[in-house]
Each structure stands twice: as C-alpha cells, then as structure tokens.
Image (spheres, rainbow, N blue to C red):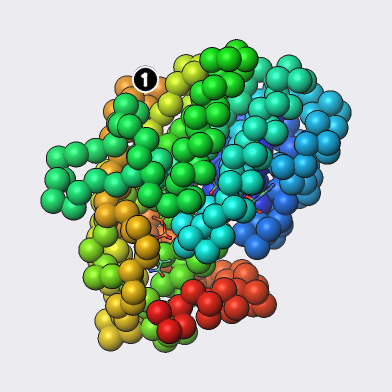
Amino acid sequence: MKILVTGAAGFIGSNFMYYELENHPEDEYVALDLLTYAGNLKNLDGLKDKKNFKFVKMDIRDRENIFKLFEEEKFDLVVNFAAESHVDRSIEDPELFLRTNIIGTSVLMDACLKYGVNRYHQVSTDEVYGDLPLDRTDLFFTENTPLHTSSPYSSSKASADLLVNAYHRTFGLATTISRCSNNYGPYQFPEKLIPLMINNARHDKSLPVYGEGLNVRDWLHVYDHCSGIDLVMRKGKIGEVYNIGGHNERQNIDVVKTILKSLDKPESLITYVTDRKGHDLRYAIDPTKIETELGWKPKYNFESGIKETIKWYIDNQEWMDDVTSGEYQKYYDNMYSNR
Ligand code: NAD
Ligand code: DAU
C-alpha cells in the first residue's frame, strides 16, 4: 500500500512514522508537513535513509498542489494528523484553526474522491465531547457521547469530524475517525503541559499551573495512540468512530508534582496562574469499542511511561534547546508573563 501521512513532522505524526516503518515495512510512505512552528524535520531524522519513506513540504489547504501530489502518487490510504493543535493558541487566533483544521480536511477528502483513494482516516480528539464533571468519576466519553465543544480548537476538530461523516454519507468516501485522549511521549512541542513543565523544572523556572491544578486529563503514551490509529485505519469499520484511551486519569497538579519529584526539584517551583478561558474540567475515555472490536491494548501504564518520557527529554536536551530557541521565547512571554 502507498500511504500519505499528513502532519508527519509533528509530535504524534512523527511517532506514527516510526511506528509504521517498524511494523509495516512492506508499505510505502509519503510524509507531508507544512513545517509550522510545531513541525520539525529533525523529528524524522531516523527515517531519512529508508527507501520506502519520503518527505514532502506542503500545506493541506493548498488545493492545487495537494491535487497534483495525489495525481502523481496514487495513494491507497490517507491518514490526517495535520492540524493546529494547541488550545491556548486557538483562544488567541481562532481563524487559523478553522482554516487548517476544517478547510485542510476538506481539501484532503476532495483529493481522495477525485483520485480514487480507497480509505481516509481522520485523527480527531476526545475534546470534541466537551468535558465531564470532576465529581462524576463514573462517567466516560463513549463514541455516542454528543459533540459539545468548549474551545475554538475543539470546535474546529468537531467540525472536521462532521465533514468527514458528511463525505462518507454523501459521497461514499470510505472514512474512519479516531478520538484519543491526551498524549505524552518523545517529540512533543513544549507548549503542552508535560514537556513545558519538564523544561521549566530543568531550568529552575517557575511551573505555571492553571487555576488550582485540579483539572483532570486522561493520559496515553503516544506509542499506544499510534498502535490504535494503525488498527483503526487498516481494520476499522468504514464510517465508524473509535475512541482511544487507557484509563490513566490524573489531576494536573499530580502530574506536575510527579515531574518535580522525578527531577529532584522542589514543589516551591509551582506557581498558580490565571486559569485558561473555558477550561475543560475532566476528560475520560471509554475504550471498550476499540478493545473489543479490534483487539487494541495499551502497552504503557502512566507510571512507567512518564518516567521513560522524562528521561527522553533529559537525554535529548539538544532537541529541547533547538525547539525553544527563537520564536518560542516570544510565545512564552506572550502567554505567561503577567498571567
Ligand atoms: P502537533 O501540533 O505537534 O503537530 C501538528 C503538525 O501539523 C505539525 O507538524 C505542523 O507543522 C503540521 N501542520 C499544521 N498545519 C499544517 C498545514 N496547513 N498543512 C500541513 N501540515 C500542517 O500536533 P499533535 O499533538 O502531533 O497532534 C496531531 C493530531 O492529533 C492533531 O490532529 C490533533 O488534533 C490530534 N490529537 C492530539 C492529541 C494530543 O494529545 N497531542 C490527542 C488527540 C488527538
Ligand atoms: O485531549 C486531547 C487533547 O489534549 C488534544 O486534542 C490537544 O491537541 C492537546 O493539546 C491536549 O489538549 P489539552 O488542552 O488538554 O493539553 P495541554 O497540554 O495544553 O494542557 C493539559 C492540561 O494542563 C490542561 O488542563 C491545561 C493545563 N496546563 C497546560 C499548560 C500548557 C497548565 O496548567 N499549565 C500550562 O502551562
């Protein structure tokens, strides 16, 4: 099979490329990315000598060039990771999220229809379900939970999901959607909680916890997300949605304290800052469908996964220094100074 992976130089996309080339060396891959601030070609360094791998710098909104690429390459399957992915940035600039996450998705699906691609997989998120109350730990997101978004980011992802369903029903495109909870692991850009806190702690900088740090996220190692996507895009039922999550709910403050403890840094580095606008309280995935229908099982639990992840960032300080130079400092000051 020839597979197009969009957003392949980002956090999950690059981990997915390693997963695929390791587990399906018989397939051929085109890795596409616009290389925005979040995309980093160095993430794919380990793959550049592989004969069945090639990188293309392109914008998924660029209809003309996307169509040309599809005409030339004749893909069998498209998996779309490309997105603006950070909630805080979506609060600053919603329109960019609508353009990339919604229009970009429609361009890719139009190309699939025009050039006869048999299968389209959309990488979505549990944030499309909104949030759950903190005091109802008996409640989980299932695939039937209504869409009920909070941020421009989650609204743009939910819109894209609705479009995917429309292309399936109206045009007969063979689609699947996966909705995963919060990922952690190597190559995550340090605007997101875990790498940001590791980096700040390493430099003895304060750790900015939003509100009281009581919000709950359901953490899944990126490897397990990749194995879930791989199963859904190859074996999932056409037209269906699959949730991916491993029952690893943690309060933010506990995650931050775990990081400090493991780096042997004091809790006095924690600073409570103004809360995120519209901050979702709790995410929690029910993964029964992917487990029972496709036999998916996560490999990591949070305790071993977070230890391995902290070690990766410490061992790869050069990667962190590289992505936090230049523009990142401006972003950090804009987002956190006077907060
Ligand atoms: P990321 O921000 O690290 O990576 C996104 C990638 O998309 C970057 O490499 C960026 O350069 C690329 N990109 C952005 N705009 C583009 C465009 N117009 N054309 C081509 N490429 C473009 O994000 P991530 O955390 O790796 O997330 C990947 C996908 O998974 C997203 O769709 C996100 O919504 C979804 N998701 C993320 C999580 C998570 O916890 N990070 C959880 C569930 C779902
Ligand atoms: O649930 C899946 C989603 O998880 C993905 O769809 C998103 O792309 C991904 O960014 C992530 O969204 P969150 O908003 O949950 O992740 P983030 O790392 O930004 O924040 C995690 C929690 O930590 C959240 O409750 C906000 C809090 N936080 C975050 C940052 C960056 C802080 O307290 N301080 C911070 O500095």
Is residue 221 or residue 33 the one in the foreground? 33
Is there any visible trace of residue 84 in the rendered image? no
Q: Position of residue 248 (x, y in %)?
A: 28, 49
> Vertically, is 123 above or below 322?
above
Question: Residue at 43% across / 84% down in the picture?
Answer: 338
> Vertically, is 270 above or below 54?
below
Question: Residue at 74% across / 37% down in the picture?
Answer: 30
Is residue 274 or residue 80 the one in the foreground? 274
Question: Residue at 33% across / 58% down in the picture?
Answer: 279
**Residue 252 located left or right of residue 204:** left
**Residue 169 placement: quadrant:** top right
Q: Quadrant of the C terminus?
A: bottom left
Is there any visible trace of residue 78 in the rendered image? yes
Is residue 143 or residue 182 the one in the foreground? 143
**Residue 120 placement: quadrant:** top right
Mark 1 CB within 8 Å of ligand 1? no
**SS state under label 1:** helix
Question: Residue at 77% across / 42% down in the picture?
Answer: 62
Q: Quadrant of the N terminus?
A: top right
Q: Position of residue 66 (x, y in %)?
A: 78, 36
Count up the numbered dots: 1
Amino acid at circle 1: Glu
Q: Position of residue 125 (x, y in %)?
A: 44, 42
Mark 1 — residue? 293
Q: Position of residue 36 (x, y in %)?
A: 68, 58
Badge 1 density bin: few <14, some 14–19, many ≥20, Cα 10 Å: few
Is residue 203 or residue 273 the one in the foreground? 273
> Vertically, is 115 above or below 100?
above
